[in-house]
Image (cartoon, rainbow, N blue to C red):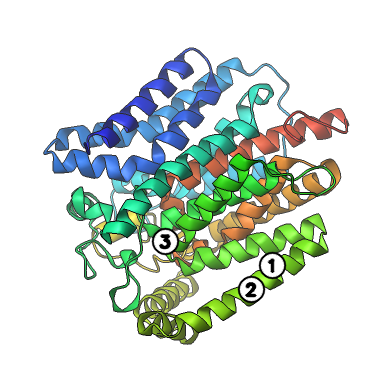
Amino acid sequence: MLLIFPFAYLLSFILSLRALLQQKANAIFVYVIAGLPIYNTALSIVYGYKLKSWIPVLQSFKELLIIVALVVAVWNYRKKLVSHRLDYWILAFLGYTALYVLFPIGKYDIVQKLVALKSLSFFTIIYFVGRLLDTTSFSLQKILYAVGVLAFFAACLLVFELITYTHFQTHIGYAFFNQDYYGLDVGGHYGLSWSFEINDGLKRFASFFANPLELAGSTLVATSLWLAYYTTPNNKLDITKAGWIIAGLTLFALLTALSRSSLAGYFILLYAYALITRKKEILYFIYTLVGAGVIYLVYLLNDRNIYDYIISTVQLSDTSSVGHLLEWLEGIQSIVTSPLGLGLGESGRVAAAVQENVGGENQFIIVGVQTGIVSLFLYVGIYVVVVSACYRAYINVGSKLALALFLMKLSFIFPLMTSNFDSYSYILYLTWLLTGIFISSISTHENSGSRHTGIAQ
């Protein structure tokens, strides 16, 4: 029964690759939405079935499909490429970080540096795939419905986990796979990692995602797409029955993941949406929701585990919060003392695999520790440019995709500050593909001087 996940992963790859070879570059979304969420689960199961020789092959699918999609997109590109300032920011980041492969900085060899460079800068390649895709056949509705189907299957597994009060990952060799391939020690009370629980062992669930944090982050993506798609040109919400189901499923997943950073991101998302759509009733709803949440928290204080969780969160005294603070301080100190960086691999996945990580629980710090202040400035600048471009496109043109990305990027602020957020492949690939498509659409719009573009609406 468990083999359904590796087969589904393999099938998503085959379907995408086949369509890509038929020069249908948009087929990359089949793999991104159907395959990447179960990536870690599929590999864990393959590992558990003693098929270790297949794992490097399955791991290579992510990069292979992006490279094939890039080649197909370039081959099929027939329009005049209109540059956008984000292109230059992203090229600058890629070029600058790539230099660190050659610089004699850090203790890792060139192969390890290339692996670290991929983890750090591969999003730039994903962006340019989206940038060069044929946007005339892009459908935000199809993306939303595909994400909705994904949320449905994730919720089904979450229900099973809640009923049995057992992590799905305990059945699939998850911990041993991650320990063997990524150097992640088994931790916590359940033989997985500390991310699967909060204080005093209260469980957090991940469904078939890599961990509860990735599941929680995926709900921010789904909610942003949902709000953007169902928002009418006059800033009304016109939601179908299917839309309400998607909303309920994503909220259910967020609550079972119990990620504080994503919960904070969720409220930032809702508040930003209320402000940009300028609807007082939505703001009143949010204030009511916050009030109801406070009352509910007071009720939950009767549960000692929840009480300790809330108090330790506010005081930053629990193990997780203290761990974040120590990692941040170590990373910041490293950036101050080595403003050019310690070298590729000194923070993030490569360093974690050998237990020598420096400041690894903050995406911004991970960038700064490895390649210094310049790359950190470029990385932050990329996000600022994306958010500002999305804001202007929604205000001036009413672009639904702009609204979705605007909400996503703002909601990612806290997860970016508390995790190696770019290691969540599903979120990384989907958001940067959509960012590339969005920039392509507004570049065409700005060049033509027209009021509307296909993607914008």
Question: What separation in Å lies between label 3 and label 2 (alpha carbons)?
Answer: 19 Å
Residue type at mark 2 is Val
CB atoms of marks 3 and 2 within 8 Å: no
In depth, the one of 430 and 256 nearer the eye is 256
- The residue to which callout 2 is attached is 290
Q: Position of residue 440 (x, y in %)?
A: 69, 33
Tell which circle, 3 or 1, labels the residue nearer the N-terminal end: 3
Vertical comparison of 339 with 216: above or below: below
Tell which circle, 3 or 2, labels the residue nearer the N-terminal end: 3
Name of the residue lying farthest toward the top: 22
Vertical comparison of 260 with 183: above or below: below
Residue type at mark 3 is Ala
Q: Residue at x 28, y 74 (%)?
A: 201
CB atoms of marks 3 and 1 within 8 Å: no
Name of the residue lying farthest toward the left: 50
Question: In the rendering, which numbered label is found on residue 257?
Answer: 3
Q: Residue at x 36, y 81 (%)?
A: 305
Residue 101 showing in the rendered view: no
Q: Residue at x 52, y 84 (%)?
A: 298
Question: In the rendering, which numbered label is found on residue 286?
Answer: 1
In depth, the one of 92 and 457 nearer the eye is 457
Q: From the image, which quarter does the C terminus lie in?
A: top right
Q: Nearer the viewer, mark 3 or mark 2?
A: 2
User: For mark 2, does the 10 Å Cα neighbourhood hold few (<14), some (14 to 19), or many (20 or more) residues?
Assistant: few
Q: Residue at x 36, y 44 (%)?
A: 114
CB atoms of marks 1 and 2 within 8 Å: yes
Q: From the image, which quarter does the N terminus lie in?
A: top left
